[in-house]
Amino acid sequence: MHIDLPTSPRHILIIKPSSLGDVVHTLPVLNLLRRRWPEAHMSWLVGSAFASLIQGHPQLNEVIAFDRRHFARAWCHPAAAIGLSRFVVDLARRHFDLVIDLQGLFRSGFLTALTGAAVRVGFANARELAPVFYTHHVPIESMEQHAIDRYLAVTDALGCGRQPVEFKFVLDAADRAHVDAIVGGIGPFAVLLPGATWPTKRWPAGRFAALVDPLRRRFGLSTVVAGASDVAEIAEHIPAAVNAVGRTNLRQLAALIERADLVIANDSGPMHIAAAMGRPLVAIFGPTNPVRTGPYHRPDSVVRANLSCSPCYSRKCNHISCMNWLGIEPVLEAAASQLSRPRPSFASGKLDGCPIAANIGGP
């Protein structure tokens, strides 16, 4: 499919509010759009919780933060209703001529329509009636493909191509100094990321705890446990050398991952940051499908139990066998393999304030 644009777009909006992993997956789309239209004014509508990760990005002119939780109360809270109305009016006044909805849900599709843009692009198979708000529908060959490849179908339809697939993160000296203050002089270290949004995605805390000693003995790695403050209770059971849980914002967490010699993580947003940065990575999967949402083009980093009920995509389960039956040895074997392989090269990132760009090869 090819979309014929009436004119070269001057004001482009990407709508991708969440989640953290999906925001990371959208970075290659931003890169390709900027390469195709270097003079365009580029905006990104993103959830407030994730805005800091792309704030100040050199390929963006503005970040439009969308406070979903606050605006969701608009039907019963006058202040929220007024705020939402102002947000919608402001969005329309920006006069976007190309809007790309990569979220594909009713809310994002509705926001796409409210912009009044002449060209509104989304997936033909988007959910919750979202396609009714688009002027152009991009067909997806199969849902059994990675999310990034689905996004690249949109850039391809717009004439931006599918290559290169680059993930650019903006980290500065302050972000790295914050990490230095947390880890001190512990030497080489592995970052353990035991959190996940779904309980069924979480490998037991005891298994993460059991990794600490063999990581030190076999690989000479100290351990740093990290994540948002909601991981604090889990982290209490992991005897890591450093507990960084709740002590980093998103950019500082990315700076910590950048410095890690190894990352071991559940299927989560921080896992996708590690994958995009090209870090040695062990990604633990259970109810979700790594073909769809695993580390992009890095199947060798995935560890999972081979059970007939997995993937099930369920957020609730009365046994969670896919995680509970996975022991530490497969994880340690994957760690050894990851540590022995050459790391993907970074296109840049040597200088403070410059974007870190990991270039992940295409098919």
Image (spheres, grey):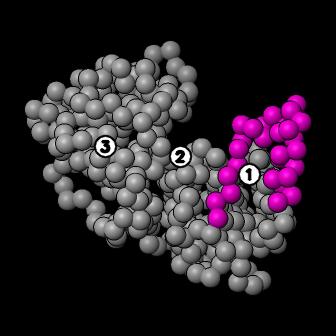
The earlier-in-sequence mark between 1 and 3 is 1
Residue 251 visible to an observer of this rendering: yes
Residue where numbered disc 2 is placed: 20
Residue name at image x 13 percent, y 40 percent? 219
Q: Nearer the viewer, mark 1 or mark 2?
A: 2
Mark 1 nearby-residue class (10 Å; few <14, some 14–19, many ≥20): many
Callout 3 amino acid: Ala
Q: Is residue 68 magenta?
A: yes
Residue 325 visible to an observer of this rendering: no
Q: Spatial distance from mark 1 to mark 3, Cα to Cα?
A: 40 Å
Callout 1 amino acid: Ser
Q: Spatial distance from mark 2 to mark 3, Cα to Cα?
A: 25 Å
Check disc 1 and report its element: helix, strand or loop: helix
- Quarter of the image for residue 96 reads bottom right
The earlier-in-sequence mark between 1 and 2 is 2
Pick out the residue farthest to the bottom. 7
Q: Of 87 and 25, which appears nearest the observer?
A: 87
- Compared to 202, does 186 lie above or below? below
Tell me, for residue 181, which label it has, or none. Answer: 3
Mark 3 nearby-residue class (10 Å; few <14, some 14–19, many ≥20): few
Q: Which residues are magenta?
A: 62-90
Callout 2 amino acid: Leu
Q: Nearer the viewer, mark 1 or mark 3?
A: 3
- Image location (x, y in percent) of residue 278: 32, 56
**In this rendering, would 190 be left or right of 152?**
left
Check disc 2 and report its element: helix, strand or loop: helix
Mark 2 nearby-residue class (10 Å; few <14, some 14–19, many ≥20): many
Quarter of the picture containing the C terminus is bottom left
Residue name at image x 33 percent, y 30 percent? 243
Residue where numbered disc 1 is placed: 108
- Compared to 323, does 226 lie above or below? below
